[in-house]
Amino acid sequence: MGDNRISGSGEAKPMRILTGIFLDTGCLEELRKYHELGVIRGVTTNPTILSREGVTGGWPGIERRCKEIARLVEPLPVSVEVTSNDPQQMLEQAITFSEWAGNINVKIPIHGPDGATENLKLVHELETRHDIRINVTAMMSAQQGLLAAMAGATYVSLFAGRVNNMGYDSRQELRRLRNLLDAFDSPAKIIAGSTRETLNIVEWFEAGADIVTAVPHLLETMLVHPYSKETVRQFLEDGARLHQEPAVGLARAAA
């Protein structure tokens, strides 16, 4: 659960230690920029992201880009998603991904496109028999997250932005999932993904997420504030003015 902090009542209160922000990208330039700032704690990718970032060359192209990402941020975790819905192919891909780098974990969707439920069997097998860290993805509800955690997933990804798109409050689902995992003393980490706006990042941490994924431009918005720019400009202008003032005190001392 984390360290113990003293609450206002004087009692020791367990506090969750947040993991932080995972950058949702396949772009090496953007990844290098934010990694060097020291503000990310991992990376998430999927076939859509890699395709959007211009990854080509089939399987060798995927392998090359994923290895580059993993090497760039090592030892931070990198999520790489399977590209098949066939159980045997997913198993083989997951094992292959895990051999590319020690910090790669594997994303497996909660179920197939038509609702087939064999994916959790695969999650359980990969975590318990193959010792591969799994990120169960494409979940929209706390109940899905609970089942994924019970199957042994290291990460359970709730697509909170899509939950909002459906007209529900994703914060409520995150709180429910947080309470459930805590009640079962589950070590699974909650990832809130599908982030739509900068406000989501803080809101979802407050609602109980351990990790929030964010695309690079949201981190830019999170960091840069117009009033901060205005304030820094004022400091620099006043600093320059100070340097231009004559050194009256020094002149008198010399006399």
Image: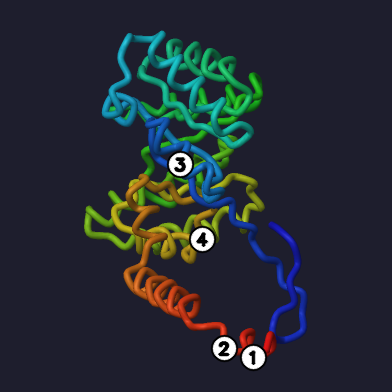
Q: Are marks 2 and 4 in contact (CB under 8 Å)?
A: no
What is the crowding at mark 1: few (fewer than 14 residues within 10 Å), some, or many (at least 20)? few
Is label 1 or label 4 in front?
A: 1
Q: Are marks 3 and 2 in contact (CB under 8 Å)?
A: no
Name the quadrant of the N terminus: bottom right
Instruction: Write down the residue under mark 2.
Output: 248
Instruction: Write down the residue under mark 3.
Output: 33
- Secondary structure under tag 2 reads helix
Q: Is residue 168 left or right of residue 33?
A: left
Residue for point 34% across, 51% down: 195
Q: Please state the horizontal and vertical placement of residue 39, each as a whole percent of the image.
A: 53, 51
What is the crowding at mark 4: few (fewer than 14 residues within 10 Å), some, or many (at least 20)? many
Query: Toward which corner of the image does residue 112 lie, by quadrant?
Result: top left
**How far separated are the C-alphas under marks 1 and 3?**
50 Å
Q: Please state the horizontal and vertical placement of residue 75, each as a whole percent of the image.
A: 63, 33
Q: Please state the horizontal and vertical placement of residue 140, each as a whole percent of the image.
A: 35, 47
Q: Disc count in the image?
A: 4
Q: Is residue 249 left or right of residue 28?
A: right
**How far separated are the C-alphas under marks 2 and 4?**
58 Å
Name the quadrant of the C terminus: bottom right
Instruction: Write down the residue under mark 4.
Output: 208
Residue for point 38% across, 13% down: 61
Q: Earlier in the sequence, mark 2 or mark 4?
A: 4
Q: Please state the horizontal and vertical placement of residue 118, each as a whole percent of the image.
A: 43, 24
- Secondary structure under tag 3 reads helix
Relative vertical location of residue 157 with respect to residue 128 in this rendering, above or below: below
